[in-house]
Amino acid sequence: MSSRREFLKTGGALVIGFSLRDELLGQQRGTAPGPDLRQIDTWIAIHSDNTATVHIGFCELGQGASTALPQIAAEELDLDMSQVKTVGLDTNVTPNQGGTFSSASVARGGPQIRTAAAEARLALLQLASKRLDSPVDRLTVSKGIVSVRGIPNRSVTYGDLVGGNLFNVPFTGSAPVKPATEYKLVGTPVARRDMPAKVSGKHVYMQHVRVPGMMHARVVRPRGQGAYRDGAKVLNIDESSIRSIAGVRLVRRGDFIGIVAENEWDAVRAAQQLKVTWNLKPTLPGNDRLYDQMRAAETQDRVVLEKGDVAGAIGKAAHMVSLTGRGPYQAHALFGPSCAIADVKTDSALIACTTSDVYSTRTNLARLLEIPVEKVQVQYYEGAGTYGHSCYEDAAQAAAILSQAVGKPVRLQFMRWDEHGWDNYGPAHVGEVRAAADSDGRIVAYEYNGWQHNWAVVETSAQLAFGTQAAERDGGAAQQVSPLNLGSMYDVPNLKLVNHRVPGLGYLKGGWLRSPLDLSFSFASEQAIDELAYRVGMDPYAFRQRNIKDPRWLGVLDAVAKAANWTTRRAASNLSKAKVVTGRGIGVGTHLASYGAAVAEIEVDKETGRIRAKHMYGAIDAGLAVNPGNIENQISGQLVQTVSRMLKEEVTFNKTNVTSLDWNSYPILRFEECPEITPIVVQRLNERSTGAGEEVMAGAAAAIANAFFDATGVRMQEYPFTPSRVLAALKKNGG
Amino acid sequence: MANELKIRVNEQVRTVTAAPDTPLLYVLSNELNLQGPRFGCGLGQCGSCSVLVNGVEMRSCQTRVSAVEGKSVTTLEGLPAWYAAQKKLAQAPALHPMQQALIDEQAVQCGYCYNGMIVKASELLSKTPQPTEAQIRSAMNGHLCRCGTYPRILKAVQRASQMMKGVAK
C-alpha cells in the first residue's frame, strides 16, 4: 500500500499553506491540473489517530459551509465532529466542486461529500471485515471504531485500518448512503466551528496573511468607475508628486497603475498622493436618467415563459393591476476590501486570494500571466463576507500584475474607495407587471416584462493593463427575468414572462449580488399581487393562500404568517392621520430552488419620510436542512440585508463616474436601525437540500413594500425608500 | 522618516520602527503581527480597526502611532487580560465574556466585524455593566456589519452583561 504522502507528491497535491512559508516560496509548486475527482483519496484521508480529513471544494464565506459539510461527512463516516478536519481550498489539494455561489455549498457540495464519505466508509468496512473475520453486514461503527455487532470487544479503528495510507478506491458514487431516519448529526444545529478562532483574533483572514520578502501594494484608479466600456485612460502621470516618499515604486502597465513599497503606509500614502490625469468620459446616464435610458434602449428580447392567453384573460377579468417597479444598482460593499498576495515567477505563480472559485481564478490568472495553467496555484483565504462577485478576482489580478512587474511577492489590498467604486454592482432593473383576478379572488393572468443588463466578464485590472475589451456574459439564469420567482408560485392559467436585455457596456460593471435581481423582481411582482388582493377586497395572506397550490410554497407562507401572528384584514384598512403610522406586509419569493416567505412590520414617519423596520419574519424551506442553526443565521442575515437594501442602498453616479465611495456615500443599515428578527426553518428531512443563502430576500423586499402600502395607502415604485423618495411619493399621492 | 517608538500594547512595551504619522493599525498588523484590528475603511467609518487606548475605544486607522506613546493600547487579543485586571481576577480567562457570549449566541456570519464589535462592547460593559437595549444600540451604532449580524450581537452583549454580574471587582 502506497503512503498518503507519496500520493500527495505524485498527485502534485502538496498540502501547503502560507504557514509553511519556506515551502511556499521555494520550488515546491504544483504541476497537476487538479486532484483526481474519481479517487476517494482526493476527498477523504484517514489518519492513524483515527481522525479524518475531508477535502472540500467549497469556501467558507461566513455561511457556515466549513461546519455543515464536515457534518455531512462525519454523519456518513460515523465519526464525531471532533474527528473530522478540513483543509484550506487550494487548486493542488482540494477537489474542483465548482464555485461557491448560487447557495451551492450544501445543495451541490453536500451530495458529493455524502457519497464520497459513504464510499470511504464501505471501503473501511470491507477492510474491517477481513481484519475481524466477520461479514460487512454484521459490523457496526461508532466514532470510527468498527466492531462486530453484539461483540463490542472485537473491534478495530479506522486509523488502524488505513491510517496514513491510501484507499486506492475509485469514487463511483455507488455506495449506499444513510437514510435520513438514521441521521444523528445531520439536521442538528452543530455549533459553528470557526467561531473560537474568530472571536479571539486567531482566525487568519486573507488581510492578515504575510509572507517573507513581501512588498505592499495599492492600485491607483479614478475615484469611482465610469462606463464599463470606457475603463479608465491615463493622460498624464506626475511622478514627481510622490518623490518625497522614499522607497516606493510606481508600476505602470497600460492604464493600470500601482504603487509597490516595503512599508504598507508608504504604499497607501503614495497611492493617494500620486497625481494622475485621467481622461474621464461623460457617457453614463447618471442616476437621473438611468431608468428612462434602460427602458428606451434597443433591447434583445426573449419570451422566457408563456402559457395560455394573457391578453385575452386580462380583457375579461374583473380586476386588473398594472405596476412598475424600479430597483437601483447595489454594491457588495465588502466589509474588508479585497486583498491578495501573488508570487509570480517567470514560469510559475502562486496566488492567495479570497475568490469563491479557486479553479476559475486559476484559469483566468494563467491566461493573464501567460503561464501554463498547471504552473499556477491558487489558494483561498477567507475575507469579509462577499455576497457575490465583488472585487476579489480583480484584486488577485492586480496583485499578480504587480508581482510580475517587480519580481517579488506582492500583497495588494484595495482601499475603501477602490472596493466601493470599482465593484461589479448588482444591476439596476425596471419591471412592469400586469396581473388580473376574477371576482372570486383567483389570479387569472400574469405578465412580467423586465429590463436589465448582464454581468461583466472582463475584470478591471485586465481591462486597464492589457486593453482587454469590456464584454458581458451572454446569458445565465440569474441575469434575466426569472421563471422561478415571477408568477410561477401561483396557480395561474395565463402567464407570460419577457426578458429585455439592455446592452450594458455603457453602464456600470454588473455582477452577481446575493439573490441577483430578485429583490427588484419581487418588489414589482409581489406588490402587484398584493394590490390585486386589495382590489378584490381580500386579506393579502388569504389571497395568496387561495392562489397557491404547491404545498411547499404554502408551507413557508403559513409558517411565516403563524410566526408573525398574522390576523385577517384587508391591507390599508387601518389608515391613520397620525405623524407616525405602522404597517405590515407579506411576500413570497425565492432565488433558485428553495421556497421563501416573509412578513415585515414597519413604522413610517410621514413628516420626515423616515421608515423604521420594527420586526422582520422570514421562513425558508430548503429541503433537508443539514444545519438548521446555520440556516437561521442565514435567514437573519438575509432579512437584515434586505432591510438595508430596501431602505438605504443605492449606488450613486453622475455622467462620468460612481460617487458611492465609502460608508457615508453608500450607507447601510446600522445597529440602531436594525429590526427584531424571527427566522423560521421549515425542515424537510426527505427532500434534497437546496440553497439557503439567498431565498428569503425577495419575499422580504416585497413584504417591506407591502407594509408601506398598509401603513400609508401608497405604492412605492422605486427603492430604496429614502426619506426624500418617501416624502415625494406621499406628496404625489396626497398622503 | 521612520523612527523608533516605544508603545505599550496588551501590557507589553514594544519597540517599533515607523514614521510617526503612520496609522496605528498598520503598526499593529505589520510590526506586531496582531490579527484583531483589521482594515475596513481607513476612514474611521466602520469600526473594524478599533482598539482600546487607555480603556477608550479608538479607530486605529485614524490614530497616529505617535499619539499612543505613553498610553496603553489593548487589542482584541489583550481583552481577556484587560478584563481580568479590571475585575481584579487572579488569572485572565481564556476569553472575555463578550467573546464567549458571541459563541454562546452563535452570532456569526463572516466575523470580520467581530474585532470592532467586541472591543466596543467591552468598553461599553466596563462603563455600563447593565446597559439597556437602547444603550447597547446607541453605543454600537458606529460599528457596521455587512452580514447583518446585529440582532445576535445585541443578544450577545446582553448575555455578556449577565455573565459579568457577580464577577468580583
Image: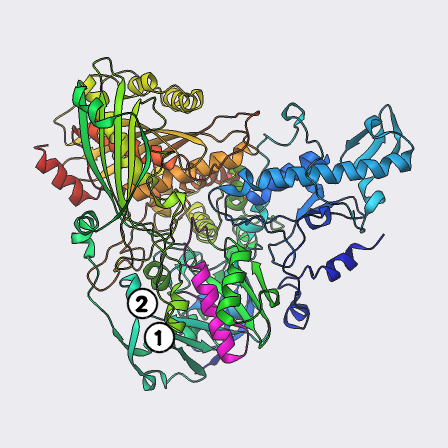
- Residue A410 sits inside the magenta stretch: yes
Tell me how the rendering is colored: rainbow
Which comes before the other along the chain, label 2 or label 1? 2
Outermost residue, top direction? A440
Q: Which residue is mark 2?
A: A231
x, y percentage for residue A496? 28, 32
Distance between the alpha carbons at the discs numbered 2 and 1: 9 Å
Residue type pointed to by label 1:
Asp
> A231 above or below A173?
below
The foreground one among A143 and A148 is A148
Q: Residue at x 24, y 13 (%)?
A: A440
Give the SS element for disc 1.
loop
Task: Read off the magenta span.
Answer: A385-414
Q: Quadrant of the C terminus of chain A?
A: top left
Q: Residues within 10 Å of mark 2 (few under 14, many from 20)?
A: many
Give the SS element for disc 2.
loop
x, y percentage for residue A491? 34, 21
